Image (cartoon, grey):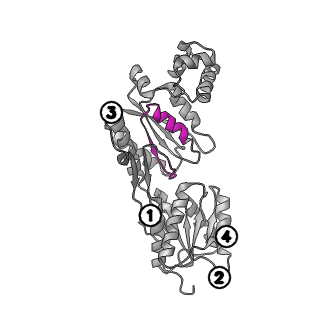
Amino acid sequence: MAKLTIRDIARLSGLSKSTVSLVLNNSPKVDPETRRRVIAVMREHNYVPSFAATALAKGNTGLIGMIVPGLTWRFMANINYGVAKVVEDTKYEMVLFTSTNERDYGGAIDRVMSSGLCAGLIVVTHDQQPLDRLVDLHAGGLPLVLINTLGAVNALPSVGADNYTGGLLVGRHLLELGHRRIAGILGPLDHPYVQERRSGLREALREAGLEPDPELEAETDFAEALIRSRTRELMALPADRRPTALFAYHDSAAFTVLDELVRAGVRVPQDVSVVGFNDIDAAAHVRPALTTVRQPFVDMGRQAARILMTALDGVESDEESQRVVLPTELIVRDSTTSVPADR
């Protein structure tokens, strides 16, 4: 089937070609109902305008769009800093589109599609993943880079971090301290990054001749109440089956685990060690300071911006240079110690 044109969209929506063009150019002359009508037809027929051509025709090649999962996410400041450190040395300016898990960022994508304002786009993944739409945008000519915080499998230019090795480093560290019953306070297992971190921990256990114990793998979600509940369940196991170390799937979950242990009168790290993942700024300032895996969020932003700049400059690059996985690093602080002597 031939690719649809603006003329086709106009015919299908019962509007003139000039009206459709006004919608694509985000003109204030178009009323909201007409705009919704055109966008609905575009969605129904998977119409993807050529963003590069639109931006060049309008002379609006000086803006880079960035879709982020809310500015309140604790690591977003570091990602934004990395992107900005590259962009501020170029001719481009940045415009942010925000969304949350409760508000699908498909709406932000629609605004990008209808405005034609952005010469390129950086997208930070979060819980909702309409990656097929991003693939369509990229195929339609929009230079686009994914900052892949979820480890989502995709064919887009992307920058991520090595979650598997992070989990492996956690397991090896705790095993060196004498821990043998290491529990995972896991996030949602439909998230690839959770699977990768669990796989790394499992591999470390197998290296030590231990078989992972399903009883010590507690799946949670992003709700604090469930994280607290799973922590209590693990610590309520009989003494010979109770974990001596807890590995939380990210630092915010680890903070909740620490607080729940304090409420229960469990000492960290004397009674049980705790490890997080991400190394957000607060990890060094909780008490005890959190042992965690550092994701290079600043470098992830910087690398994504560099890949995008290369594409905007029209420089061809190979697939390897467009799909970057950065190393993670174990940061040892006060929340881990040797296994208790009586265990």
First to last magenta residue range: 131-153
- Say which residue label 2 marks: 239
Q: Which residue is pictured at 39% across the width and 59% down the height?
A: 327
Checking the image for residue 232, the label placed there is 4
Position of residue 274 relative to residue 150, above or below, is below
Note whether residue 268 is visible.
yes
How far apart are the two marked residues, 2 and 4, measured between alpha carbons? 14 Å
Q: Badge 2: few (under 14), some or many (20 or more) residues near its Cα, within 10 Å?
A: few
How far apart are the two marked residues, 4 and 1, measured between alpha carbons? 28 Å
How far apart are the two marked residues, 2 and 3, measured between alpha carbons? 62 Å
- The answer to if 137 sits in the magenta stretch is yes
Which image quarter is the C terminus in?
bottom right
Q: Badge 3: few (under 14), some or many (20 or more) residues near its Cα, within 10 Å?
A: few
Mark closer to the chain start, 1 or 2: 1
Nearer to us of marks 3 and 4 is: 3
Residue 157 % position (x, y): 42, 43
Residue 108 % position (x, y): 55, 34
Nearer to us of marks 2 and 3 is: 3
With 302 as the anchor, is 138 left or right in this view? right
Mark closer to the chain start, 3 or 1: 1
- Say which residue label 3 marks: 314
Mark closer to the chain start, 3 or 4: 4
Checking the image for residue 165, the label placed there is 1
How far apart are the two marked residues, 3 and 1, measured between alpha carbons? 34 Å
Cβ–Cβ below 8 Å for labels 2 and 4?
A: no
Cβ–Cβ below 8 Å for labels 3 and 4?
A: no
